[in-house]
Image (tube, rainbow, N blue to C red):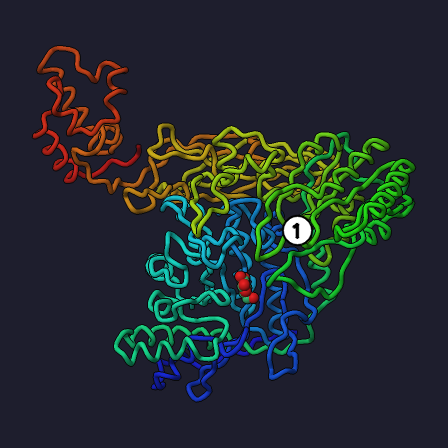
């Protein structure tokens, strides 16, 4: 069993190390290990990928080099694509705790994860490693993983900071993002996790942001991460990301990984010696690295082994919760394990895909297949199997034909068909993006043929990135999204199909009708080294909803074998108005116990000063209910959760007024809504004649002042003012006030505008909108 022995070592100031020694600490001693200086009490830190299990390098015996192709067994938990669909942070915390226990047993101090990049496009080859298209869901799930690791004494490396949203040209591309989407979408999960969970390390991505490579990005690594968010850990580079070691150190990158045989260190020594780099910059990094090394190695572990059986069961329990039931017309599911004949078709039922390829690839301790799971659970039902298609895509046309025919014969002779479809391993991986989201054509052809002989088909999908289900999903009565479920996912799929587990997963990303509908479509993956995030904040459901775009299955969607009714939505503001308790009563009106994930969205005030998505996820909660049982799903929202990032004001800002709070079973199944009046933040905008009439009128101080001036002018002139004519008022609303003030009929003179602006800057603000 794991046992922590508290350290007696305290953090000392930078010891009196030589310049060369200090520089040596800023890069790895090997592929996954940092440099130690025993005389200064600075131990080496061992790291391992991450994120859904350990990729444990085996020593090749060849000069101590690590052989990354063959790795030692570790539990392969559901990758983030699946875990995200559980909407269950507590589960993520437990999974991370188990990964930490395995890490400790193998002497690993830091796990390289979680990966919390936003799924900007379904084409991103690494989407299986990320949680969601939504930053709040990502932050809750990723944050729980950080907590699970670090509470067990193992460090997290939050990655890939920031805006690593594609694999195409990932080592050079600049993600060009306006400040508002950068803050609201791409940095939001990083910010929330850094502030709340205090990760020990952050991994700087390969790509650039707004023209500056992340390893050299002072604004993101220092100004935002450290100064604004208070990050106190170390920043390490992604593997091989550093091009200019001195610039990176200056920008705030403490650790270059992996080691480069001392090249980077020599560059640092040379720069300090030549007076090009202030030694204090190096000292700061060394202090952080020494603290990190002591912190990471502080917990000493003894272990009774890696608990393979226990962790396999946890991987199965987690997978149970990740399966998303997309469709179940005519209640085809669950299947009866006691009677009937079931045709299990598809090579993926026998040779499952359960994780993606690249640095996160784990050698599992065991592997459950869906076919074995179904055979084991069938107590009277007869289960037949036909592979239906080859997986590797290298079979001859003849083989393909005979596999399909065998499957069609089995389908025709069975009561129900469970058809496993999905992507082959070579279709998606770290390192490259997909160029379409379609299933392999031979699989879709097989589906057509099977449907023709037996309409009772349940399709089960295995895929790390979203696949298109249109148009065929309308023609199958049941559809399960099984993602990549980790080493115990086969059993989970069998349990859901036979009903011993009632599915409760919900989509963490939209399944579009067509690739062309995806909000980033026209600007993904960019060209000539730049990718412009032209859709702004309208990522994922925010973008589909804003354009009124039909989708195959919306964000947050997932069915159950029971039904849930929502009633009595309450929004109770706390006395100081800084938080709201939101609660809704959920009733299980079906006949099975089940879990419902209740989603709370908000909608900004009418006439908002910025373009807003129609709704945004702010919180979620799960309830477990027996048939007939009711319970409240309750969350707390902070007033500041409703803020948007104002580029003009250079900060977060809550708009005062009536915001709508919605409770829904998905982003497109909103059951109840209520209004809440929110106190706005004072405007930091300093009004001048260059602000438009509309901006003046919206301003909490400038608005009343200007209205008052108009009223007085009207009284003095006793003739209708331009402001009384709605058409004219609208015409003028986009004009700067200094332009209006020059019109002969203007109710305010140019001098008057200057005077009003000075007054507006002095008076206190009323902020309730
Ligand atoms: C990946 C990281 C990973 C690192 C170490 C990089 O190529 O982007 O996610 O942690 O390699 O394997």
Residue 590 occupies quadrant? top right
Q: Residues within 10 Å of mark 1 (few under 14, many from 20)?
A: many
Q: Position of residue 77 (x, y in %)?
A: 66, 59
Q: Nearer the viewer, residue 551 or 106?
A: 551
Q: Is residue 280 left or right of residue 332?
A: left
Residue at 89% from the left image edge and 35% from the top image edge = 412
Q: Secondary structure at mark 1?
A: helix
Say how many tags the image has.
1
- Could you tell me which quadrant the N terminus lies in? bottom right
Q: Is residue 606 left or right of residue 134?
A: left
| Residue 89 visible in the picture | no
Query: What residue did someone put label 1 on?
Result: 427
Quadrant for ligand 1? bottom right
On screen, 514 above or below 60?
above
Q: Residue furthest bottom?
A: 39
Q: Position of residue 173 (x, y in %)?
A: 45, 54
- Could you tell me which quadrant the C terminus lies in? top left
Q: Position of residue 320 (x, y in %)?
A: 70, 50
Residue at 16% from the left image edge and 39% from the top image edge = 761
| Residue 732 visible in the picture | yes
């Amino acid at each position: 069993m794991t046992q922590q022995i508290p350290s007696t070592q305290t953090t000392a100031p930078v010891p009196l190390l030589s310049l060369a020694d200090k520089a040596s600490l800023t890069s790895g001693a090997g592929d996954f290990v940092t440099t130690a200086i025993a005389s200064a009490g600075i131990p080496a830190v061992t790291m391992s990928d991450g994120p859904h299990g350990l990729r444990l390098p085996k020593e090749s015996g060849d000069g101590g080099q690590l052989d990354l192709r063959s790795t030692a067994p570790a539990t392969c938990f559901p990758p983030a694509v699946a875990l995200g669909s559980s909407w269950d942070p507590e589960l993520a915390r437990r999974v991370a705790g188990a990964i930490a226990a395995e890490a400790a047993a193998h002497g690993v101090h830091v796990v390289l994860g979680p990966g919390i990049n936003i799924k900007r496009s379904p084409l991103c080859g690494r989407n299986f490693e990320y949680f969601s298209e939504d930053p709040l869901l990502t932050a809750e799930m990723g944050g729980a993983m950080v907590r699970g690791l670090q509470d067990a004494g193992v460090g997290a490396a939050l990655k890939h900071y920031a805006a690593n949203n594609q694999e195409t040209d990932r080592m050079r591309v600049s993600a060009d993002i306006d400040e508002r989407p950068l803050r609201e979408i791409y940095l939001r999960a990083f910010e929330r996790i850094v502030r709340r969970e205090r990760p020990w390390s952050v991994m700087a991505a390969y790509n650039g942001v707004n023209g500056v490579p992340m390893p050299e990005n002072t604004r993101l690594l220092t100004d935002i991460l450290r100064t604004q968010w208070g990050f106190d850990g170390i920043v390490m580079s992604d593997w091989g990301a550093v091009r200019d070691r001195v610039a990176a150190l200056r920008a705030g990158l403490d650790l270059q990984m992996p080691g480069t045989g001392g090249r980077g260190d020599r560059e640092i020594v040379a720069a300090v010696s030549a007076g090009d780099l202030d030694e204090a910059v190096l000292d700061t990094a060394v202090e952080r690295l020494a603290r990190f090394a002591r912190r990471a190695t502080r917990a000493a572990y003894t272990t009774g082994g890696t608990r393979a059986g226990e962790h396999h069961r946890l991987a199965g329990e987690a997978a149970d919760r990740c399966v998303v039931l997309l469709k179940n017309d005519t209640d085809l599911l669950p299947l009866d394990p006691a009677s009937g004949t079931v045709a299990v078709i598809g090579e993926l039922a026998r040779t499952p895909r359960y994780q993606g390829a690249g640095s996160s690839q784990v050698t599992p301790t065991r592997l459950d297949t869906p076919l074995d799971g179904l055979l084991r659970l069938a107590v009277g039902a007869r289960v037949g199997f036909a592979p239906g298609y080859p997986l590797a895509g290298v079979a001859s046309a003849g083989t393909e034909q005979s596999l399909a025919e065998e499957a069609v014969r089995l389908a025709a002779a069975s009561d129900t068909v469970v058809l496993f479809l999905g992507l082959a391993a070579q279709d998606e991986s770290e390192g490259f993006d997909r160029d379409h989201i379609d299933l392999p054509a031979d699989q879709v052809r097989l589906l057509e043929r099977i449907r023709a002989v037996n309409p009772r088909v349940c399709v089960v999908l295995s895929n790390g990135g979203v696949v298109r289900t249109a148009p065929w999903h309308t023609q199958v009565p049941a559809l399960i999204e099984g993602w990549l479920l980790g080493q115990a996912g086969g059993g989970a799929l069998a349990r859901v199909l036979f009903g011993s587990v009632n599915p409760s997963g919900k989509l963490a990303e939209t399944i579009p009708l067509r690739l062309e509908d995806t909000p980033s479509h026209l600007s993904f993956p960019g060209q000539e080294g730049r990718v412009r995030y032209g859709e702004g904040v309208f990522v994922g459901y925010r973008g589909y909803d804003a354009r009124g775009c039909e989708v195959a299955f919306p964000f947050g969607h997932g069915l159950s074998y029971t039904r849930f009714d929502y009633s009595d939505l309450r929004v109770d503001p706390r006395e100081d108005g800084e938080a709201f308790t939101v609660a809704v009563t959920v009733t299980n009106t079906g006949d099975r116990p089940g879990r419902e994930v209740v989603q709370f969205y908000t909608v900004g005030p009418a006439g908002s000063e910025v373009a807003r998505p129609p709704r945004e996820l702010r919180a979620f909660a799960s309830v477990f209910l027996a048939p007939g049982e009711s319970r409240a799903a309750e969350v707390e929202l902070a007033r500041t959760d409703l803020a948007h990032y104002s580029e003009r004001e250079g900060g977060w800002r809550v708009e005062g007024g009536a915001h709508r709070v919605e409770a829904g079973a998905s982003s497109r199944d909103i059951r109840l809504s209520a209004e809440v009046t929110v106190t706005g933040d004072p405007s930091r905008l300093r009004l001048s004649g260059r602000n438009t009439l509309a901006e003046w009128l919206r301003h909490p101080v400038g608005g009343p002042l200007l209205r008052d001036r108009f009223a007085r002018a009207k009284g003095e002139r006793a003739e209708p003012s331009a402001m009384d004519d709605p058409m004219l008022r609208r015409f003028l609303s986009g004009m700067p006030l200094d332009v209006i003030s020059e019109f002969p009929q203007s109710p305010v003179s140019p001098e008057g505008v200057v005077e009003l602006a000075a007054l507006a800057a002095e008076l206190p603000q009323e902020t309730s909108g």
